Amino acid sequence: MSGTESTPVVDALQDPLVAQFRAYLMNERQASEHTLTNYLRDIGQFISLIWGPEARPPWPWKGPDRFAARRFLVEFQKAGSRPTTTARKLASLRSFYRFLIREEQVEQNPFSGLRAPKAGRPLPDVLSVAEVSRLLEAPAQCARQAVEAGGEQLGVDAYGPLRDTALLETLYSTGARVSEVAGMMERDIDLLSGVVVVRGKGRKERLCPLGGPACRALRAMLDRGRSLWEGGRERPVFRNLQGNRLTTRSIERMMKRYLAAAGLAARFSPHALRHSFATHLLDAGADLRSVQELLGHASLSTTQIYTHVSVERLKKVYNDAHPRA
């Protein structure tokens, strides 16, 4: 039986201990829904490999040994899974067994001491300053074209382009993750001071500056939104055309549309604006520690990937321009 992503995944929550582990992740670790989904999928795949997809709970968690744990990870490596995927599965099962030990359900952690496969760190996709400008201008340009084709945009129709401009400006101005921007509330934004409270991983808060263009775009969008929907400072910043919170998936689709309008590659995601934010700051002389704080990285080593991006860009400029490169 294969332990790859195509293996039938058992519903791990059928097991009461897995259900308790999920509650622990939610209540004590404050894990996101994305993290919970990944952990439960990984545990379900482990169950499928060790006991088979037809096995029924409760599963005998004391049974698997170090060799079973290693076989589980090797199945994914043999199937060509990315090292980061295999490393996540190791982290998921290791964490689950730590919980079982804490609850005195098992005595040994078969995943303890196993090493995750080494992963190369591909350089992130980064837009140039000129490309970012084209992308940020795309919503207004599309709106102008729509007006020329079909008349003046009113009400909710006029809100859409204002929102899209403000959203793209906020992503690039703050370097925030798309989930952080989607979760912003009006109370988080201070347009007079030009700052926004961003809630990141682990619900940690950080202050991010808002540039002038982002503040102007946000003010125009919020003014239009207040004329359409009721509510005070406790409402989401970015809404869909029904007045509800905009989802990350909607933001991704929106960006694909404007990438095409700006003549940019479709491979870029909203996260590319975060990569571009960090790289452009370092290119302009910002120090690494400041960029780390702005991005909300717990470790400086995570931020250092952008120094490699900057060096590669400098090398390309050198190779393109120097007569003896």
Image (cartoon, rainbow, N blue to C red):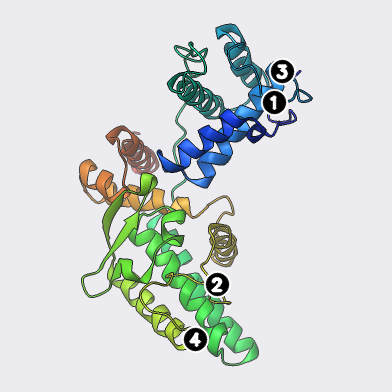
* Residue beneath the point at 45% across and 72% down: 165
Q: Is residue 52 visible?
A: yes
User: The residue under label 2 is which amino acid type?
Assistant: Asn
* Residue beneath the point at 51% across and 25% down: 96
Name the mark nearer the viewer: 1 or 3: 1
Which residue, given by chain and number where applicable, does mark 3 sit on? Answer: 51
Q: Could you tell me which secondary element the residue under label 4 belongs to?
A: helix
- Figure disc tally: 4
Find residue 228 and name its label.
4
* Residue beneath the point at 64% across and 16% down: 60
Percent coordinates x, y for residue 238 in the rendering: 46, 70
Locate the N terminus by quadrant: top right
Reading the chain from its start, which is encountered first: label 1 or label 4? 1
Q: Could you tell me which secondary element the residue under label 1 belongs to?
A: loop
Name the mark nearer the viewer: 1 or 4: 1
User: The residue under label 3 is which amino acid type?
Assistant: Trp
Please determine whether, in this image, residue 107 is positioned above or below residue 224: above
Assess disc 2: are there few (<14), some (14-19) or many (≥20) residues with their C-alpha within 10 Å of its C-alpha.
some
Q: Tell whether label 4 touches label 3 (CB within 8 Å).
A: no
Name the mark nearer the viewer: 3 or 2: 3
Find residue 57 and name its label.
1
Left or right side of 229 for 77: right
Percent coordinates x, y for residue 324 in the rendering: 33, 34
Depth check, front residue: 149 or 164: 164
Give the distance between the C-alpha atoms of the residues marked 3 and 4, in whole angstroms: 56 Å
Assess disc 1: are there few (<14), some (14-19) or many (≥20) residues with their C-alpha within 10 Å of its C-alpha.
some
Which residue, given by chain and number where applicable, does mark 2 sit on? Answer: 240
Reading the chain from its start, which is encountered first: label 3 or label 2? 3
Outermost residue, right side: 54
Give the distance between the C-alpha atoms of the residues marked 1 and 4, in whole angstroms: 52 Å
User: The residue under label 4 is which amino acid type?
Assistant: Leu
Please determine whether, in this image, residue 12 is positioned above or below residue 63: below
